[in-house]
Amino acid sequence: MGIFAPFLTKYEPNKTVGMPYQPPTREHPLGTDRMGRDILSQVFYGARLSLTIGISTGLIMTTIATTVGMIAGYYGGIVDRILSTLTDIFLVIPGLPLMIVISSYMRVRGPLMVILVIAFTSWGSGARIIRSQMLSLKNREFALASKVIGENDFYTIFVELLPNMLSLVASIFFSSVLYAIIGEASLSFLGLSDVSKITWGTMLYWAQNANALLNGMWYWVLAPGLCILLLGTAFALISFSIDEITNPRLRAR
């Protein structure tokens, strides 16, 4: 929907194309919003920014979590204690309230701020998972052999050990993308992002402001909510497939 949005609908998402609050018709399958904009075109174009925010945030979160978790698990000692304490701080603080507090103090609101706020407050759980896996892998024969032949720590961590955790890293990435999309929707629903941009989250914000459910416009709420639900299901299935490909036990079955 995001790539082919201009071919799937003839309406621009921000242009008035009909009367406000029109029910679903042949021309507007999901009706129009309170400004007469086509809701279906907003769903199509909203997929672009929602996925951009989700994937960008997921990449940053996964990079931070993987780096912190692998370094903490590999070196141990004081390095592990410092990084584990930092990770525990972000795990103890509830993610959504922390995002709300930080976003409320941001003077500049936009997709970039949403990406940074979500990414730098929500990487703790992934880092904890990576660390536990690293504690198991670093004492394997191939890792010890890498040290014996004189390879440096960077090579051992990111060339020898990281490929053995690709399924885990992929799972964390897809979970992070979904978390980011839900986080963006939550912040937009509360009006803490740039609501002039079209995303599935801002659609829910405007639907709530217009009392869509009370006015019988359930499709205005259902469309973006269903898209987020289906996207989460898709990411879960992709994660399972990657695990089946990279996990020797599942591949043998």
Image: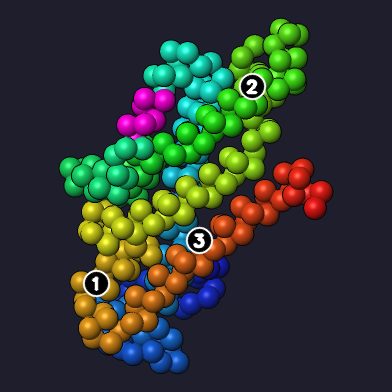
Residue 9 visible: yes
Q: State the mark number for residue 208.
A: 1
Tell me the distance, in whole angstroms, between the alpha carbons under discs 2 and 1: 51 Å
Which residue is painted at 71% across and 15% down in the image?
Answer: 144
| Amino acid type of the residue tagged 1 in the rendering | Gln
In the rendered image, residue 88 lying in the magenta stretch gets the answer yes
Instruction: Please identify, in this view, whether the residue under mark 2 or under mark 3 is nearer the observer.
Output: 2
Circle 2/circle 1 CB separation < 8 Å:
no
**What is the CA distance from the residue labelled 2 to the residue labelled 3?**
33 Å
Counting residues from the N terminus, which is met first, the one under dot 2 or under dot 1? 2
- Disc 2 target residue: 138
Disc 3 residue type? Gly
Q: Which span is picked out in magenta?
A: 84-90
SS type, badge 1: helix
> Which secondary structure class fits the magenta region best?
helix
**Amino acid identity at mark 2:** Lys
